Image (cartoon, grey):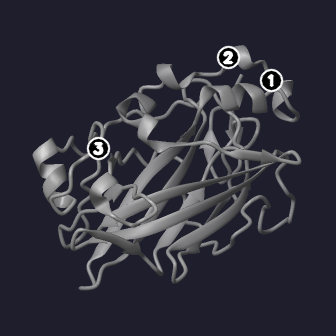
């Protein structure tokens, strides 16, 4: 059974008050609980605040998103690629159900959300067996491999799309995908927003009944409700993949006050 000793549960940032969140979102009414743990200071002291928008682009329905710990397994591989399933050196593709994941990244400015182009979106996560690439751990050593890692730059519409696999699980953490969004704002100051995506329990229970995930007992998996990181706002970071022909697709809308 893979069990990673890590500091993934180390809290970062702070919780915004409702008043602060309303001010940051241009005076719009804040929706739901605003558990933003993500004022990430850059070298100029700027911060990145995440929010979702409705189809009209209005911040009237923006809800603050929590920034979460980067964890011990981030490696800046500098791999600009949309399909992150393979190892860049060997070409070997990690087995698992195809997951097409689309990020729609917006900038919150003057009370509105507009597409944010040229933002770097990094993605990394474990394989179907709960193992990370390019990492040393008591239960594995994958140094020099870089599968399930990569980044894309958002296009003019603020879109970055990845082909990956549905991650597996390891003891102590709910199933998750790490992501980081970084770049420079209009004045040249850097911004950096790091968080994690989660999946609903009904979806995972169904998906993990299929190969290659069904080779492991689902009874050992940590559920969302028992994950300390998820309980700091993971319900605001859920994605619900659609299924078609054995593959999955999901999108995640996020706005940054940079």
Res. 31 mark: 3
Residue at 19 percent across and 73 percent down: it is 44
Q: Which residue is mark 2?
A: 220
SS class of the residue under badge 1? loop
Residue at 20 percent across and 56 percent down: it is 28
Check the image and report above or below for 182 versus 164: below
**Viewer-side residue, 234 vs 179:** 234
Q: Are marks 1 and 2 in contact (CB under 8 Å)?
A: yes
Query: Where is residue 70 shown, x and y percent of the image?
Result: 44, 49
Q: Residues within 10 Å of mark 2 (few under 14, many from 20)?
A: few
SS class of the residue under badge 3? loop
Q: Earlier in the sequence, mark 1 or mark 3?
A: 3
- Viewed as shown, does residue 159 lie left or right of 231? right
Check the image and report above or below for 10 versus 216: below
Question: Marks 3 and 2, Cα distance to the nearest angstrom?
Answer: 35 Å
Query: Where is residue 175 shown, x and y percent of the image?
Result: 61, 34
Check the image and report above or below for 168 versus 63: above
Res. 216 mark: 1
């Amino acid at each position: 059974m893979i069990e990673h000793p890590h500091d993934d549960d180390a809290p970062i940032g702070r919780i915004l008050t409702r008043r602060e969140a309303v001010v940051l979102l241009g005076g719009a009414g804040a929706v739901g609980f605003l558990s933003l743990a993500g004022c990430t200071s850059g070298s100029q002291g700027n911060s990145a605040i995440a929010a979702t928008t409705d189809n009209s682009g209005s911040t009237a329905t923006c809800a603050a998103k929590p920034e979460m710990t980067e964890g011990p397994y981030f490696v800046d591989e500098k791999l600009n690629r949309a399909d992150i399933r393979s190892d860049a050196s060997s070409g070997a593709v990690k087995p698992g159900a195809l997951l097409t994941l689309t990020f729609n990244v917006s900038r919150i400015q003057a009370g509105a959300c507009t597409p944010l182009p040229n933002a770097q979106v990094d993605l990394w996560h474990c394989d179907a067996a709960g193992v990370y690439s390019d990492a040393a751990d008591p239960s594995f050593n994958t140094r020099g491999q870089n599968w399930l890692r990569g980044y894309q730059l958002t296009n003019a519409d603020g879109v970055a799309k990845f082909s990956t696999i549905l991650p597996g699980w390891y003891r102590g953490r709910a199933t998750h995908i790490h992501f980081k969004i970084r770049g420079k704002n209009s004045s040249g100051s850097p911004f950096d927003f790091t968080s994690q995506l989660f999946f609903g329990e009904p979806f995972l229970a169904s998906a993990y009944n299929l190969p290659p995930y069904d080779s492991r007992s689902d009874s050992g998996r940590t559920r969302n409700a028992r994950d300390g990181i998820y309980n700091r706002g993971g319900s605001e970071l859920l994605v619900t993949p659609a299924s078609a022909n054995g593959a999955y697709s999901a999108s995640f809308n996020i706005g940054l006050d940079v």
